[in-house]
């Protein structure tokens, strides 16, 4: 494969490619305008977040997110994944992270994992399918109500709301999520790894893309596109330019068009073709032709099957531990961390072996000897493992404590068990959580331990509760504890 020539080989496609960052910047501008409108008007259009489609599927409440998802899916069926390439704020962050990394001299290298590719499908099933299956399996389930629009006064504003940030996990957790999902994942697993290994919408759009009659194709030459030997010199520059790691030149030779549903129609390959032989236009839908290719990217995977199983075990355990940890870690962040940790676990195993190992641009071991970077990495791996085990213990005690608390009203033994588990959680947690504070406060009030309840009650109030609730918590410290609202 030749080195990529400087600049864009096709000026027209180069212009389209250069437009994309501006369009993506426009997405952020729209978001800023939306936020400002909410700040000054008090109410605004409900969040245009795709995850709000869950409210429509589960509660029949029409949301802006559902309308956007349906529109994006229809557009994908017709035009391919332009929405991903030109309208997704997470993709903008991933591509920006890749650009920044290249500016500091690091080219992200794709890590090709087999089983992790199932994660977006798993996420899609968890978010959109499983609640439907659960409802259908519930013997006494009621039929879904008709689709409806609701207002804030009914508890949820479906199209207009004052609760603009209702899905956001707080500023620090939001920043952490973006840094990990876009920045760290790109650095360690390659460009667009969030799309490949996490994003449930990507899984939906990939399915829709297979039906799309708009594809990257060899231009109509000599009586029709698809005559690869006549149209394409097979130089591979398109493949080298593709941030989705598609073997573009091979797909063009085999099928006359790109059939991989990871194609986001971003024009990088079209702009890179030195003979301007590519464009994006009408072509036969790909269906499942991409399954004929060996591997996700058309080249062998990076892990052996034994390593895949190790990675899958670490990934599943990490996801179970991290999702919702401290009532704070969101699903997508937990998934991204699980994939990163699963690959890091395999690298740790390899560092102890004979092979030369590199990770994120650093050489970890060479000729069977660990390098300085390898030693630092090994220490970091031990620390990460210890942190994960500690978090697992917190999750286990928390679950046992909550279960015991449910039975505490009828049994002093369960009451003591709940207190023991939840106090363990309180002592060993990195941060206090509202759920644990509330239960420990109630248990302390119940046994007349106002001094024990006070710090927990203060934390509950400090997190922000209504004045009435704050008053009743204060009263409960001095009055009949069983009158505390919400107790049992
Ligand atoms: S796959 Fe997901 S994250 Fe990637 S561009 Fe599409 S919607 Fe955005
Ligand atoms: S195949 Fe071309 S248009 Fe599709 S993602 Fe790769 S570079 Fe972009």
Image (spheres, rainbow, N blue to C red):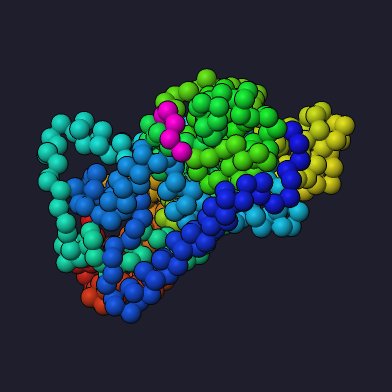
Q: Quadrant of residue 477?
A: bottom left
Write the residue at 32% across / 42% down. 74
Is 282 a magenta residue?
yes
Asked whether, in this view, residue 66 is left or right of residue 368, the answer is left
Q: In this rendering, is residue 196 above or below 233?
A: below
Q: Nearer the viewer, residue 308 or 216?
A: 216
Is 21 a magenta residue?
no
Is the N terminus in the top left, top right, bottom left or bottom right quadrant?
A: top right
Q: Quadrant of residue 204?
A: top left
Q: In this rendering, is residue 468 above or below 235?
A: below
Q: Nearer the viewer, residue 475 or 249?
A: 249
Dominant SS in magenta: loop
Asked whether, in this view, residue 383 is left or right of residue 406, the answer is right
The x, y position of residue 219, in whole percent, is 54, 34
User: What segment is highlighted magenta in the picture?
Assistant: 281-285
Q: Nearer the viewer, residue 472 or 47?
A: 47
Write the residue at 44% across / 56% down. 328
Asked whether, in this view, residue 104 is left or right of residue 197, the answer is right
């Amino acid at each position: 494969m030749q080195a990529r020539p400087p600049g864009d080989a096709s000026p027209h496609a180069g212009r389209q490619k250069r437009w994309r960052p501006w369009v993506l910047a426009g997405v952020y501008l729209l978001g800023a305008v939306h936020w400002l409108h909410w700040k000054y008007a008090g109410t605004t259009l409900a969040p245009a977040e795709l995850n709000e489609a869950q409210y429509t599927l589960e509660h029949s409440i029409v949301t802006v997110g559902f309308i956007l998802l349906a529109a994006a899916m229809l557009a994908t069926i017709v035009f391919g994944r332009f929405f991903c390439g030109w309208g997704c704020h997470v993709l903008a962050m991933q591509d920006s992270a890749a650009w920044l990394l290249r500016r500091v001299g690091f080219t992200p290298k794709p890590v090709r994992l087999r089983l992790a590719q199932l994660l977006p499908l798993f996420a899609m099933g968890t978010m959109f399918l499983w609640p439907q299956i659960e409802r259908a399996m519930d013997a006494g389930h009621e039929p879904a109500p008709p689709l409806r629009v609701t207002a804030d006064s009914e508890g949820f504003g479906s199209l207009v709301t004052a609760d603009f940030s209702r899905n956001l996990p707080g500023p620090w957790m939001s920043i952490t999520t973006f840094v990990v999902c876009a920045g760290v994942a790109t650095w360690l697993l390659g460009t667009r790894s969030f799309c490949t290994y996490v994003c449930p919408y990507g899984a939906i759009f990939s399915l829709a893309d297979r039906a799309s009659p708009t594809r990257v194709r060899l231009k109509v030459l000599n009586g029709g596109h698809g005559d690869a030997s006549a149209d394409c010199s097979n130089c591979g520059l398109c493949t080298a330019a593709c941030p989705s790691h598609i073997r573009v030149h091979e797909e063009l030779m085999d099928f006359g068009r790109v059939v991989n549903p990871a194609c986001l129609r971003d024009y990088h390959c079209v702009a890179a073709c030195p003979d301007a032989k590519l464009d994006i236009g009408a072509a036969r839908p790909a269906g499942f032709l991409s399954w004929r290719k060996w591997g996700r990217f058309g080249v062998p995977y990076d892990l052996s099957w034994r390593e895949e199983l190790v990675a899958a075990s670490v990934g599943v355990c990490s996801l179970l531990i991290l999702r919702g940890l401290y009532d704070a870690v969101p699903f997508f962040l937990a998934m991204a961390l699980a994939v990163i940790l699963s690959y890091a676990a395999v690298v740790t195993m390899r560092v102890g072996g004979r092979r030369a190992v590199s990770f994120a641009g650093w050489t970890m071991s060479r000729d069977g000897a660990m390098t300085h970077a390898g030693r630092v990495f090994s220490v970091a791996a031990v620390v990460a493992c210890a942190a994960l085990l500690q978090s697992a213990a917190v999750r286990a005690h928390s679950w046992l404590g909550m279960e015991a608390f449910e039975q505490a009203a009828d049994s002093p033994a369960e009451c003591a068990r709940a207190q023991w588990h939840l106090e363990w959680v309180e002592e060993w947690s990195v941060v206090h959580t509202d759920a644990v504070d509330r239960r420990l406060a109630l248990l302390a009030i119940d046994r007349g331990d106002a001094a024990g309840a006070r710090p927990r009650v203060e934390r509950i109030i400090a997190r922000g509760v209504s004045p009435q609730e704050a008053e009743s918590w204060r009263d409960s410290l001095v009055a009949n504890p069983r009158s505390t609202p919400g107790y049992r």
